[in-house]
Amino acid sequence: MRLASNTTARAVSEWIGNTPDAKIPNAVRLRVFERYGGFCAVSGRKIMPADKWDCDHIIPLKDGGEHREGNLQPVLADFHHAKTAEENHTRGKVKRTRQKYLGIKRKSGPPMPGSKASRFKKRIDGTIEIRSGHD
């Protein structure tokens, strides 16, 4: 664990994880929880003692966010999973759109049997022949 030097009038230095997957200490989880007044940052619902909640990154690590206390927010576990899935979906769509814009095509597999791109053509009577131009 590494503590950042902070020039503000903060009693405890901000926690910064050594690695992106470093476990968040319980004391940091408590400070994040108290900073949000015990409310879920996504749903706005009060987090009760029996509720499972996670520390979520406000700016996701995959989008350049840092693994530090100032980038964490309390989120109920169910909402956290939904939020992460939505972020991944959006990230994938942006990536596909960008690749299309740049002319980068996805590598496709073999053609679907029976399609015009296939080497073989199946006739109505059930016989199979080789398409012309695919010799």
Image (cartoon, rainbow, N blue to C red):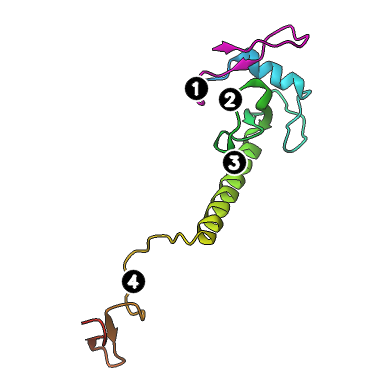
Residue 115's place in the image compared with 106, above or below, is: below
Element at badge 4? loop
Earlier residue among tags 1 and 4 = 1
Please provide the residue range marked out in magenta: 1-21
Q: Position of residue 107 (x, y in %)?
A: 38, 60
Residue for point 68% across, 23% down: 70
Are there few (<14), some (14-19), or many (20+) residues within 10 Å of tag 2? many
- Is 92 a magenta residue? no
Q: Which residue is mark 3?
A: 84
- The kind of residue on which mark 1 rests is Thr
Q: Position of residue 105 (x, y in %)?
A: 44, 61
Is any atom of residue 50 visible in this view? no
Q: Which residue is mark 4?
A: 111
Nearest-to-viewer mark from 3 and 2: 2
Q: Which residue is mark 1?
A: 19
The image quarter containing residue 36 is top right
Q: Which residue is mark 2?
A: 67
Earlier residue among tags 4 and 3 = 3
Residue 5's place in the image compared with 76, above or below, is: above
The image quarter containing residue 75 is top right
